[in-house]
Amino acid sequence: MSSTPGAILATFLQEGQARGAAAGFSWDFTPAHDSAGQPWAKILTIYYQPGIDALTTLINLAEQGTLDFRMAGRTLQAYNADTELGRDLTSGSGPVDLRSGRDVVAAPDIGTYEDAATSALVVGDDGFRMSLTNGAAEAPWGRWETYIGQGGVSDPGTAQLLAEAVLLRAGHEQVQRTRQITPHTARWLPWRDYRPGDRILAPDEAGAMESLRVRQMTVTRDEKGVLGGNLVLNDRLLERDLRLARRTAGIVGGSTAEGGSGARPAPESPTPRTPAAPAGLIVNPLAYIDEHGLPRGQVTVTWGAVTTAVNAVALTVGGYELFMRVNKVGAPWFLVAVTEAADTSATYSPLVVGWQYQFKVRAVNLGKKGLFSSSAAVTIPDDADAPPVPAAPALESRLGVVHVTWDGLGVGGAPMPADLHRVLVWMQDPLAPGWQEIGALDAAGSLVVPGLPCDLDREFSFTSVDRSGNSSARSASVTIAAVRLVEGDAADESITTGAIVANAITAAQIATGQIQAGHIAANQITAAKLEAVLTLATRIVAGAATGARVELNADGLEAYNNSSVQTVSISSASGAVSIVGQLATGVTGRRIIVNPAGAADPEIRLMPGTGANSARIWTDTDAAIRLNSDNSPDGTRRSEVIQRGDEWRMHMVQTADGLAGGGYMFAQPDELEVGYNDIGGNLNRFRFSAASTEFIGKWSYGTSGAGLIMRAVSLSGGSAYNVTWGGPIMQTTPRVVFTPDNPIPDRLHFYVRNPGTSGFELTSNESGLSTPTVFVVLLNLWAWRM
């Protein structure tokens, strides 16, 4: 069903009370609004089988991050997550601050690295393995590894989400913060001034005030009747761990419950039955950040188990197939996941954030495809987590300008995430508040701020922005004033551009050679000194005036060879770059060479660490894209790929003569051919077209996993013949069709008895006679596994 959390819970509670259960129990939320009167923020598509209890459902919804709840007497109250039960009482005119000696009488902290890890190996289905490392993790003993085994995971996005949750939780010391409180001298009292879920100020392990969230409150009375109590508090790292745990629960948890179906037992049937359509399809989309720092989408799809055929006869299905397409009319469907019979969930990634995708699932029974479920469409959300608040700016004023420096870290030394886009630099006049953005930093570094009035304070701060546009809160601000160059410097704005006639100071006013390098102290001309544009009226040349050289002129940056032929041009007008001749990423070792010297066609050459056994990508006169691998270790073979508008070809060839030398694939608009060919005339291939499938060559098999068996068997006997598959024991019993050959009496008819994984028994209508006919049978048989 698709409902609000309130509608789901109210359905459980109303139906229970209608049966006479939970007398005296009440709730103050509705299907439309939470207990604070706010509209529910989320609509869920979820599936529950009969038998699941209301408490399990309530906890599941809370773990999924859809609601917070509490009991007020015998009344259940439920709220949108992180709203009413997540108040921030750390700011404003009267912040709740628990002070040592007044509100807090003891502050024990217990820390442990028991579950610490820096790297994780994720092992999923079908041999999937992925290793990830948290470079920012605390590593008191160096590299420390952990293992995540998760069935149903075979895509990198889901693996990265699971590993990220584990590594971030295991990347720092786990600290339990307990604060013993007293009501006798305290200014702030529990429940009256704060409650579980609120964020308050409390002393950290060093005694400094820190923003912490109240996780648990306990009030005690000792044997003398003296009241006391304690608080369990979460810091920002533990709060992040809880959010990650909620997200992980949505991937590996699921919302279905197993239960008996009441279907009647199934009789044996030689024909596979068609499974019914799965019910309760749920698609849970998530956003994650990939290894390149880009937001991507992942989905966890769950559904109800299929236990009957379309005619309501019970069956046990062999597995499920999950299909997906872009949510557009006419878009093709793609098979994206296959699960085993007991697995009613699947994951898939990567997906494009902001796009809508549609999903459906069906069961499979002995090769018989079942009916599709109703489809479900979801929009892949963008990353909504703001980056950490940057560390406060470091300011320096010299030579009339201010340098604003960022160390590249967040508050408390927190590393910035891979999707950090930039850090914005803000400035305001403390006497006339109003922050203005004045620049940005892509990484740790400095921004030079010129043109500030001398001796007047200016306040600076940072905010960080990620690639999804999420912005952090503002950093702590720092104030500084620009200082004059020298004492007695000209008063501010006493000499302005209006006092100097345009072009009054030009190169002609400065005698040749009067300004030399010796007149300029080292490092005295910096970017801070050049606040205007330096316009070239002539050119700056490195090298000779003619011939091989590099020069900067009014047209841009240009390079020439010994013949004065231009090889590089960067246009000052458009920024366009043009390169003529060879371009290489290095001189020796592993490198890429673009347009190598002597090449007949436009070419990219990939060179190995040593030697000249290179791979090539080039285009021929037909504009076909061609790719040649390097030669095999013995120098006899290489692979080639040719791609044209109406043809795609991949084949192995002999290095010496370029003739066929192994496997190949050949695709054209009307056919596809896959096979093996060599100069010895050995040809085995499939050809597929719209009209038919054609096979040429020899058929053989040799493993228990073979799906098709074709062979001829010569048998000599009387009452019965034992026929084997001529190879290994098969994984399952194949179906068999045979034709008996050689002259045999017309009265004889042959039958298959006791088929199994190693073979079958062949009998005739005279096998039961006391003296059955003895003759030779040549048996041509086909057998296949379904």
Image (cartoon, rainbow, N blue to C red):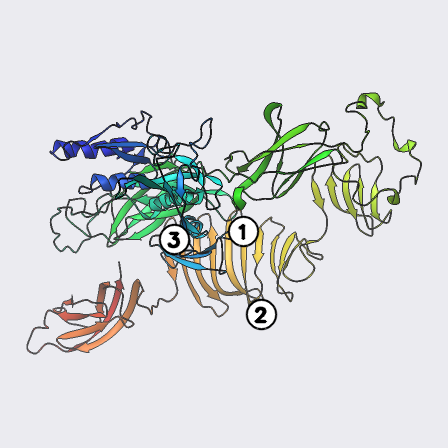
Q: Secondary structure at mark 3?
A: loop
Q: Nearer the viewer, residue 299 or 502?
A: 502
Q: Position of residue 635 (x, y in %)?
A: 58, 70
In the image, 63 versus 675, the foreground residue is 63
Tell me the mark number nearer the camera, choosing from 2 and 1.
2
Would you name the residue on which mark 3 appears? Answer: 154
Q: Which residue is mark 2?
A: 635
In which quadrant of the rendered image does the C terminus lie? Answer: bottom left
Horizontally, residue 403 falls left or right of residue 196, namely: right
Alpha carbon of mark 3 to alpha carbon of mark 1: how far?
Answer: 31 Å
Q: Which residue is mark 1?
A: 643
Q: Position of residue 403 (x, y in %)?
A: 68, 37
Who is closer to the viewer here, 613 or 429? 429
Q: Mark 3 or mark 2, which has the lower sequence index?
A: 3
Is disc 1 surrounded by few (<14), some (14 to 19) or many (20+) residues within 10 Å?
Answer: some
C-alpha gap between disc 2 and disc 1: 25 Å
**Label 3 is placed on what type of residue?**
Ser
Q: Is residue 336 left or right of residue 424?
A: left
Q: Could you tell me which secondary element the residue under label 1 belongs to?
A: strand
